[in-house]
Amino acid sequence: MGKVEKGITCSVLKCDETADRSMSLTKAKMSQELDFDNSKKRVYLCKTHYKDWKKSSKSDRETERMRWD
């Protein structure tokens, strides 16, 4: 059982919602809009912040994907 299933809170500063997804800190830093605690390697995001991350990092993720094709 992972930390998300156990009910860990969102890693975005000043957010107390339960996390829905987890990812590495370097991947989460693709979005410049979200502020995280930089002391840990994993970041946990609630549903709304994950949606914001997807929107703000879409172009970066597409460029990263093209490098591998």
Image: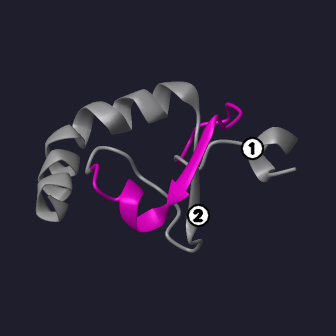
Q: Is residue 7 visible?
A: no
How crowded pointer 1 is (Cα within 10 Å; few <14, some 14-19, many 20+) is rated as some
| Percent coordinates x, y for residue 42 in the rendering | 58, 63
Q: Residue at x 66, y 38 (%)?
A: 19
> Against 55, is 62 above or below?
below
> Does the magenta-highlighted stretch encompass residue 18?
yes
Task: Work out whether residue 52 or residue 35 is closer to the camera in this orientation and state it.
Answer: 52
Q: Residue at x 59, y 37 (%)?
A: 15
> As shown in the figure, which amino acid type bears the numbered disc 1?
Val
Amino acid bearing label 2: Arg
Q: Which element is circle 1 on?
A: helix
Residue drawn at 13 percent across, 63 percent down: 67
Specify whether residue 28 is in view: yes
Give the residues drawn in magenta, as a range.
13-31
- Whether residue 29 is in magenta: the answer is yes
> Badges 1 and 2: C-beta atoms under 8 Å apart?
no
The mark nearer the N terminus, 1 or 2, is: 1
